[in-house]
Image: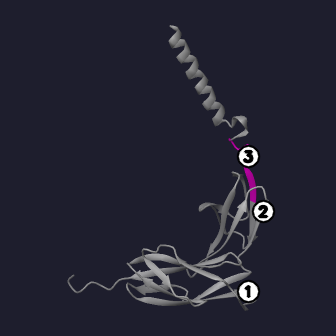
Amino acid sequence: MDRTGQKLGIALGALTLLILWACSGGGGGGGGANMGTLRVVGTPAGARVLVNGVERGTAPLNMSDLPPGTHHIRVEIRLDNGQIVAQEFDVVIGSQPEVRYDLNRYRIETNPVQVEVWVDLQQQVVATMRDANGTIVDANFVWSIENPNIATVTGSERNTRFVRGLVRGETYLIITDTRTGVSLRVPVVVVDFPPPPGG
């Protein structure tokens, strides 16, 4: 083998070793060396836990593979009526060892509990926040639609909005209280007029 071939072989060997070293977490920059831990616990037990939108399991849950930085934690339960109750937190890994949620302390109620609306028509939705004793409490609601291509939400009254159907389909109306982080997802079904006879 000539000198050029030897140099190429040495360079390839060194590159291979460098790649293996990096993949194994060499230098403390990976491989779990800087991963943080977080415990998610609260009421009720068994709630789904999502980290940055990815489901990780059910609470109580211990995680030890979260990289440094801020992570969005969402804890949710599905009610029998199809609504989803959730609480959300932004956590900086290393600043706190535990997230404690309480999906029973406050609840958002809506009338109706599910929205069915025709295309090009609208349905009024009224929301109320109650504490664990059933007492109505002040809330600062933010309203949105999960898929704005299917429906929109309009209005400016404090606890009332209108859901308007755009095209046939299903989505969720999302109501979030910014003070508690509690949110409610209300099923929305948009229906179209039936086709004419023989159509």
Binning the other alpha carbons within 10 Å of mark 1 as few (below 14), some (14 to 19) or many (20 upward) gives: some
Q: Which residue lies at the image location 63% right of the left edge and 29% below the top edge? A: 18
Q: Which mark is residue 131?
A: 1
The stretch of residues the image draws in magenta is: 30-38
Between 147 and 134, which is closer to the camera in this rendering?
A: 147
Amino acid under label 1?
Asp
The color scheme shown is: one colour
* SS for dot 2: strand
Ranked by sequence position, the earlier of labels 2 and 3 is 3
In the picture, measured across the screen, residue 43 lies left or right of residue 13, that is: right
Q: Which residue lies at the image location 55% right of the left edge and 88% below the top edge? A: 156
Which residue corresponds to mark 3? 34
Do the numbered discs 1 and 2 sit on residues whose CB atoms are within 8 Å?
no
Ranked by sequence position, the earlier of labels 1 and 2 is 2
* Count of residue discs: 3
In the picture, measured across the screen, residue 32 lies left or right of residue 119, that is: right
Residue farthest to the top, as pictured: 2
Q: Which residue lies at the image location 53% right of the left edge and 9% below the top edge? A: 3
The answer for how far apart the CA atoms under marks 3 and 1 are is 40 Å
Which corner quadrant of the image does residue 7 belong to? top right
